[in-house]
Amino acid sequence: MPQGAQPTHRPDAPRLKLDTLVRLRWLAVAGQTIAVVVVRFWLGFQMPIGLCLAAIALSAWLNLFLKVRYPSSLRLRGWTAALLLAYDLVQLAALLFLTGGLQNPFSILVLVPVMVSATALAPRLTVALGGLAIAAVSLLAVWHLPLPWHAEAPISLPLLYVGGVWMALVSAVLFMGTYAFRVAEESRQLADALAATELVLAREQHLSALDGLAAAAAHELGTPLATIALVAKELERELPKDSPHADDVALLRSQSQRCRDILGKLTSLSTQTDQMLDRFPISHLLAEVVEPHQGTGVTIDVQMAGKGPEPVGRRNPAVLYGVGNLLENAVDFAHSRVDVRAAWDEAGVSIVIADDGPGFAPDVMDHIGEPYVTTRSRVAEAAEDHEAGGLGLGFFIAKTLLERSQARVEMSNRAAPEHGAVVRIAWPREAMDGVRGGTAGAESAARGRTETQKPAGSALFRS
């Protein structure tokens, strides 16, 4: 999992389907009805069958109400599911009260609601249901109607035996509830880890496909870009210096060259890292990503402050591209100013990029960083020009490349009354300069290692 990735499981997340509880209750209704009818009419034991059937009918009516009122696919939140399970526990306790209390062999069924809660609900809800179950069996051990039996030879179990049943049920509630919860929690954690792994693998697959597309684009676009550059050069040569189109032709030529440079960087993101072993301070990183945007009409204010020496890592084109992409996005949508702040201390390194543009669109705030999701409200001119809109891959590529370097990328909007987007990139300090440079011996040792035994170096500027 990447740095900062969190599991998806939450204790209060809706997990238990209403249809599951309804089906289990129908099963209980059928079993209780059969047991009562057999005891009363087949075995001929005297019992308050009217009250028993009324308690069973109440569960059936509750099921019918839930089936009509709510869809079967509804997933219940914690307290709602716990209340339904508590009802099942109380209803069963009422039947046991009418049929002998803990002397009834079916008293073991009080464990069922607790087991269901332990496997699907939060611990505090399971503890509450366990406490209710213990209170119920404690009352049933003392207060209950006689166990249905032959009228001429009524049965009365010793209090010591009933106490043993009570102790067994309480122990089972505590032990089996804890055991079921631990097994279910480990399964949920494994499922969360697998889901997070699948998400990371899917993003890596997207990025691998984009790497191939970048190489193909560089190959296919090389010739037309060269033609455009050649035609622009010829036009620039033919036009007089005072021509009103001279600046436009010069801009066309410079932008075509920039396109070729960008394609060259994309194809070298995974190959240049191992070849370039020069040390790269964070000030050089910011200078390199800011330089292409100078003179665009947007003021870029860079400030750096930190405790201790400036972070220094190994140059990584992937990180350069990621930070540069985020800065370019800020420049594109800024009205007049972009602030870049770098800070560091002994614990971490951070870069904050903030602009004064429209900010991130609220409807995509929760999906920023996913492929094919545009990140912000477009300005009016871009909204009118369909070709001006992007594919929504910029943030996905930048975020994935930065997370490979152990970075954590967070996006937000400025607090009112200010407006604009804020992107914060944070690394652990050891990811920047886990091996402190500066001594001749350390640098010599680093240079002397073989290709198969590379220095630990810095994760920030490594792929």
Image (spheres, rainbow, N blue to C red):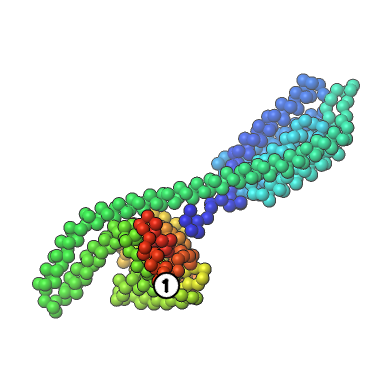
- Looking at the picture, does residue 163 appear above or below residue 238? above
Q: Nearer the viewer, residue 69 or 211?
A: 211
Tell me where residue 37 sits by quadrant: top right
Residue 106 in the figure: left or right of residue 15: right
Q: Point out residue 355 in the picture as x, y percentages from the top left corner.
A: 41, 72
Q: Nearer the viewer, residue 388 or 169?
A: 169
Residue at the limit of the structure toward the bottom, as seen here:
242
Residue shown at 58% from the left, 48% from the top: 14
Residue 32 in the figure: left or right of residue 162: left
Quadrant location of the C terminus?
A: bottom left
Residue at the limit of the structure toward the right, as seen here:
152
Question: In this figure, what is the number of numbered marks?
Answer: 1
The reply to whether residue 88 is visible in this rendering is no
- Looking at the picture, does residue 99 appear above or below residue 15? above
For disc 1, the neighbor class at 10 Å (few under 14, some 14 to 19, many from 20) is few
Q: Nearer the viewer, residue 178 or 30?
A: 178
Residue shown at 65% from the left, 44% from the top: 181
Label 1: element kind: loop
Amino acid bearing label 1: Gly
Residue 328 in the figure: left or right of residue 361: left
Q: Point out residue 157 in the picture as x, y percentages from the top left corner.
A: 87, 30
Tell me where residue 318 sits by quadrant: bottom left
Residue shown at 36% from the left, 63% from the top: 448
Residue shown at 19% from the left, 72% from the top: 250
Q: For mark 1, what is the residue?
A: 438
Residue at the limit of the structure toward the top, as seen here:
42
Q: Point out residue 375 in the picture as x, y percentages from the top left corner.
A: 40, 61
Q: Point out residue 156 in the picture as x, y percentages from the top left corner.
A: 88, 29
The reply to whether residue 381 is visible in this rendering is yes
